[in-house]
């Protein structure tokens, strides 16, 4: 059974930094694209950043230049370094991973989310 688990959320002051981690575990053959999404209360879930297995990254406009996504393929882990945080970055952050496990095709797995709150 495949699991995707996020960690690293919390409360931080405006201008501060946080680092999120997401680990995929289970009977995994390979992890393809991995990404971070966020959803504030009453809002839709939006892309924050995504990264391919070979390291090509893309970012949502609100976070470009402040957030950095990276991954460790050996650990099936993706990271999100968040700097210069703003109150509008407050949301539940979700990890999504495209994983090839016990089936002929890959599929998306989501984590349960980790809360990030930016407030003084």
Image (cartoon, grey):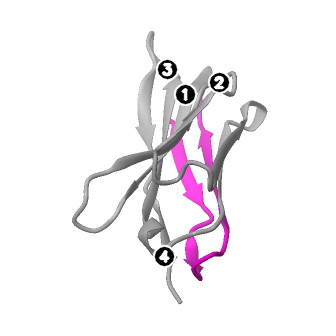
Q: State the mark number for residue 102.
A: 3
Write the residue at 68% across / 36% down: 76
Distance of label 3 from label 1 (alpha carbons): 17 Å
Label 2 or label 3, whichever lies nearer to me, is 2
Q: Earlier in the sequence, mark 3 or mark 1?
A: 1
> On the image, numbered disc 4 is attached to which residue?
117
Q: Earlier in the sequence, mark 3 or mark 4?
A: 3
Write the residue at 44% across / 70% down: 90
> On the image, numbered disc 2 is attached to which residue?
53
> Would you say residue 48 sits in the magenta stretch?
no
Q: Are marks 1 and 2 in contact (CB under 8 Å)?
A: yes
> On the image, numbered disc 1 is attached to which residue?
33
Distance of label 4 from label 1 (alpha carbons): 26 Å
Distance of label 4 from label 2 (alpha carbons): 29 Å
Distance of label 1 from label 2 (alpha carbons): 6 Å
Q: Position of residue 100 (x, y in %)?
A: 52, 20
The stretch in magenta equals 1-28
Mark 4, Cα crowd under 10 Å, few <14 / some 14-19 / many 20+, is many
Write the residue at 69% across / 28% down: 55
Q: Are marks 3 and 4 in contact (CB under 8 Å)?
A: no
């Amino acid at each position: 059974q495949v699991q995707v688990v996020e960690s690293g959320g919390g409360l931080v002051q405006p201008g501060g930094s946080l680092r999120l981690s997401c680990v995929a575990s289970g009977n995994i053959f390979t992890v393809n694209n991995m990404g971070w999404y966020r959803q504030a209360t009453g809002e839709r879930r939006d892309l924050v950043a995504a990264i391919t297995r070979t390291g090509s990254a893309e970012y949502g406009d609100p976070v470009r230049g402040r957030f950095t996504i990276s991954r460790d393929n050996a650990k099936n882990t993706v990271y999100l370094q968040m700097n210069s945080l703003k109150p509008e970055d407050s949301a539940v952050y979700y990890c999504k991973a495209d994983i090839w496990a016990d089936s002929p095709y890959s599929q998306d797995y989501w984590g349960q989310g980790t809360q990030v709150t930016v407030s003084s």
